[in-house]
Amino acid sequence: MSQENISNTVLIDNLYDSAGEHLRNTVTDWTNHELWSDAVDELDANERAVYLIGVLNQQVMNGGFIQYFDNSYGMFGYETLRVLRTVGAVNSANLLELALKIVNREQLTPDQFSKYIATNIVADELGDELDQLDEQYYKLENTEYLEELLANWIKTEPNKRWQAYKSKT
């Protein structure tokens, strides 16, 4: 298959697999927030975007926003919000922003919030508010196609991200 004709699914799967391989080879202790965060920072722009949006989507679709935060992926929440906006996933970004406001009531800075989420469980009383956002997020699956938005962002010319990806494969 020509790299020019690679499907969105194959492109995203390959980038997600590459990110996962790097993280598995780098992170020796998943409870070490700094090691995990540093490993994500080492990913290229494509891998990082696919990883951040991918884990948000997987966690929320599997167990809701509360699972996203309780499994510590929420420590990347503010960066994921930025990436969602960058790729044009406006509705997903709006819901994540609302979730971040619910969980970050103390208005911690993104760095402080990241450390907080990495070491704490979200308070049970926030569950009902987050559950309401879950229902809205689930409905986006048929209206905001994250895979397509990500792939289009990666492939947009004169976009060096796509050229860098093609030269690696």
Image (cartoon, grey):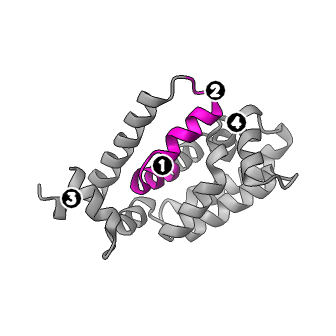
Mark positioned earlier in the residue sequence (2 or 4): 2
How many C-alpha atoms fall within 10 Å of the one at disc 4: few (<14), some, or many (≥20)? many
Going from N to C along the chain, the mark reached first, 3 or 4, is 3
Of the image marks 2 and 1, the number of the one nearer the N terminus: 2
Residue 6 got which mark? 3
- Magenta span: predominant SS is helix
Circle 4: element type: helix
Amino acid of disc 1: Gly
Which residue in the protein does label 1 denote?
Answer: 54
Indicate the position of residue 120 as horizontal and vertical percent values: 77, 33
The percent coordinates of residue 41 (x first, y second) are: 52, 46
Q: Which residue is mark 4?
A: 118
Do the residues bearing badges 3 and 4 touch, measured as CB atoms within 8 Å?
no
Residue type, mark 3 in image: Ile
x 54%, y 61%: residue? 83
Q: What residue would you read off at disc 2?
A: 31
Q: Amino acid at mark 2?
A: Thr
Kind of residue at disc 4: Ala
Identify the image quadrant of the N terminus.
bottom left
Horizontal side of 44 relative to 103 (left or right) equals: left
Whole-Å distance between the Cαs marked 1 and 3?
Answer: 19 Å
Q: Earlier in the sequence, mark 1 or mark 4?
A: 1
Spatial separation of the CA atoms under disc 3 and disc 4: 36 Å
Q: Nearer the viewer, residue 139 or 85?
A: 85
CA gap, disc 3 to disc 2?
A: 36 Å
Q: Are marks 2 and 1 in contact (CB under 8 Å)?
A: no
